[in-house]
Amino acid sequence: MWRKLLENGKSIALLPSLSLFVGAVFLGMYGVFLLVETLYKAITDPTMRDTTYLSTKFISIMDIHLLSVVLYIFAVGLYELFVDKLNVPEWLKIGNIDNLKAKLSSVIVLILAITFTKKLVEWKNALETLMFGIAVAVVIAVLVFYYKVKESHD
């Protein structure tokens, strides 16, 4: 009985997959809302046309949309790993948990780069920006190093 329950328990992965999908849809809609709001403010209020303000807002919107896509990729990945295969593009097919972690790592690098760019555009404190950049670089270096070592062992 326990074996049968565990074998049929793959549907437990439906809940995380569904919740990630719902999160992806919500973030996508929120990103569109922020874009429309930013455009409206820029059109109606001349003080909101400052390039630093607009750059920061648009970078934030890109970040939100990227996170939305990450949640979608994970929703698809969990579903494919534990429930059933989907008709998705080849680059989105997930064969094992390492593929899913690798996709997450590459997206983390991109999100960190966007976050650093946003911090750079805001540029309030040079030392703080430098320290933040170093922290971002260290995280990226560790992720790259981990996957290079893992790749050489596989």
Image (cartoon, grey):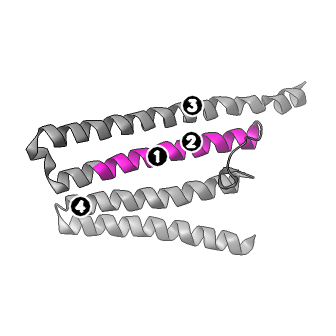
Q: Are marks 1 and 4 in contact (CB under 8 Å)?
A: no
Question: In whole angstroms, how far apart are the C-alphas of marks 2 and 3?
Answer: 10 Å
Residue that mark 4 sits on = 121
> Is residue 61 one of those drawn in magenta?
yes
- Three-letter code for the amino acid on which mark 1 is drawn: Leu
**What residue did someone put label 2 on?**
72
Secondary structure of the residue carrying tag 1 is helix
Q: Residue 100: x and y, percent?
A: 64, 52
Within-10-Å neighbours for mark 4: few <14, some 14–19, many 20+: some
Please tell me whether mark 4 sits on a helix, a strand or a loop: helix
Kind of residue indicated by mark 4: Val
Amino acid type indicated by mark 3:
Ser
The residue lying at 62 percent from left, 33 percent from top is 16
Q: Residue furthest bottom?
A: 152
Q: CA distance from mark 2 to mark 4?
A: 28 Å
Q: Which mark is residue 67?
A: 1
Q: Which residue has dot 3 on it?
A: 19
Q: Is residue 63 left or right of residue 13?
A: left
Q: Nearer the viewer, residue 56 or 6?
A: 56
The residue most toward the front is 43
Question: Are the residues at dot 4 and dot 3 in contact (C-beta closer than 8 Å)?
Answer: no
Where residue 89 sits: x, y (%)? Answer: 67, 50
Quadrant where the image shows the N terminus: top right
Task: Name which of mark 2 and mark 3 comes first in the sequence.
Answer: 3
Q: Main secondary structure of the magenta part?
A: helix
Q: Which secondary structure lies at badge 3?
A: helix
Say which of 27 and 37 sits in front.
Answer: 37
Instruction: Please tell me which residue is depicted at 46% across the width and 46% down the height of the picture.
Output: 67
User: Residue 24 vs residue 10: left or right?
Assistant: left
